[in-house]
Amino acid sequence: MDMVLEADRLGKRYGSTWALRDCSLHLPAGRIAALVGPNGAGKSTLLHLAVGLLKPDAGTVRVFGRSPYGDTEGLADIGFVAQDTPLYRDFTAAELVIAGGKLNKRWNAALARTRLAQLGIPPDKPVGKLSGGQRAQVALALALAKQPRLLLLDEPVASLDPLARREFLQSLMGSVAESGTTVLLSSHLLADLERVCDYLIVLNASQVQLTGAVDDLVAGHRQLVGPRHDGGAVGGVAAVIRASHTDRQSTLLVRTDGPVTDPDWTVREVSLEDVVLAYLADGTTQTSHSEWGVAA
Amino acid sequence: MIWLTWRQHRKQAFYTLLGLAALAALLVPIGLAMRHTFSDLGLTDCASQLARADVAQATRETCDAGYRRFGNQYGNLSLVAVLLITLPVLVGLFWGAPLVAREVEQGTHRFVWTQGVGRTRWALVKFGLVIGSVLILATVYGLGMSWWVDPLTKAAHEGRFGMIVFDLQGIVPIGYTLFAVALGVFAGTVWKRMLPAMGITLAGFIGVRAAVELLARRHYQPARTQTFPIEGEGPPEVSRGDWILAQGVRNPDGTMIAEGGRIQCPPGGKGPDGRVCGAELGLEPGAYNWQLYQPADRFWLFQGIETGIFVALAVLLLYLAVRRIHRIA
């Protein structure tokens, strides 16, 4: 399978803190991938490394087989919309389309104009005066006009209201469906992306917790409910991701490697959200009792 | 890139030109009036006449009187000149500091650096265009100021080497302005916010300028010394336009008797008690006036050296700024 993005033990450090550490993942071509993790998990850092804004401190990252940092030519194949969709606020949308044309060799201005016209974006109003949803649409139109093979979107819907979120994602899906562009979009909320993505990368505490196709992930996990579990092996279970217990009962979220046939356990299918939450809860939180001067 | 730079900065460029035009509208009439008075007082030829060794006493007195009248009328303009030397740092604050800092503060660097032009090219084109425009502005400013301040410097004893007027005219404004802009750009790549970058630019500019002006400038060339006897006819016109670094009266063995002072006695003149001139100070016969100075004809050499220092600093800062840009995400 063609890999668009490959990271191998990738790491980035700010001072003495690792924002991203030992991150290994592959993103196959043609996928719509969600990069999910809580705030501060390293999502933006990973995207910045992928678009060449940052230089890795450890490991490697490759986009279409090239190392993105300092690779100006490689930039032509990557569309990037940064967090909060930064644009020159005193430029009009029409001027931004012109600017994009001056800054890129491959540039489909007609595509951008048609998109913006369809969305009813005024061409002669400074983008700083547009609504958040409209501004996000302008940023997306500019990224698409590059006709990229990989589109990276950093929290594109975080600042939008629910209606604008839906419209944004719908128009995104509409335009990448035809071109076969690989998309990687990040969010701290899975719910935002669940309906559109078919591939998932879960980041937590600067490390990759889970990565794979959505269908495989859902099919490969089960919830087991049964008598209180003592930690012993269960047939068909590869790993217990998360366990919660009451006095007599245990509820386990497990990764399976075969059918669970043990009659003690009631097996239930899980949603993608259940899986993601189980993995995120697994991430350890560093306590700071001593800094706060309170008892642990 | 050129289009983008123009589009981003056209408003700023317009207001800068408007400000310069307003300044010119204010200063040109004053400059014309000054020149008019200067020639009305018959001072136009004084400089060349006074430079001659055989200048007549009468000419000297007329010229000195004229200079004094001119100084009384226009001397206050030196204060205006003090205000005018702040212009280079203003360019640094409003053109240099926001160049990178504003992009990073508003996050637009992530937009523009991920387009098809890399950030190296972005930086080179943008710095190049801004520096080029600033160079033109600074040249116009330097030439304009040379014209404007010319009568004032001629009337002042220390001439073009005077502390404020040296900084105002010739080619040094170009060096100062380039340095201010480069410092602003660099500060913006380190602090990445406009206000801190502007603050650092202001502080850095004042610090470096003061250090060069007060400590370094006098040493650009070995200073010359001049001695002349304390007895002589009339006040000697020894140093119009020279930059006197130190002076005093020395005894024949070289010991400094009256530092910072100067003594002039008529030939054979006697002190209060009929003693030899200056005896009450402890001067022995054969004592002489001494001065350490940079001659007036070194003006352009000093302008060149000072401009070179600031241009070199500017180039260094821009190089560091381009390097730092690669570490901003």
Image: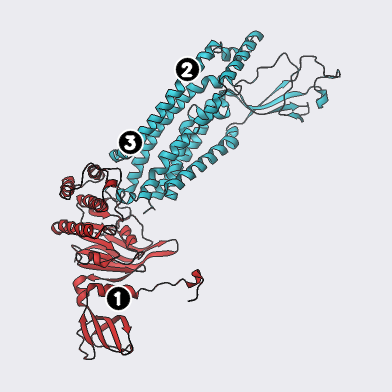
Chain colours: A red, B cyan
Type of the residue with mark 1: Ala
The answer to whether A26 appears left or right of B178 in the picture is left
Q: Which residue is mark 1?
A: A278
Instruction: Kindly identify the residue that appears in the image at 53 percent across and 12 percent down.
Output: B39
Q: SS at mark 2? A: helix
Q: Which mark is residue B10?
A: 3
Query: Percent from the top left, x then y, of residue A285?
Result: 40, 72
Query: Percent from the top left, x then y, of residue A5?
Result: 25, 62
Q: Is residue B303 in view from this perspective? A: no
Q: Which residue is mark 2?
A: B32
Q: Residue furthest right?
A: B273
Circle 1 residues within 10 Å: few <14, some 14–19, many ≥20: some
Quick one: label 2 or label 3, which is nearer the N terminus? 3
Q: Quadrant of residue A79?
A: bottom left
Q: Quadrant of residue B10?
A: top left
Q: Nearer the viewer, residue B198 or B289?
A: B198
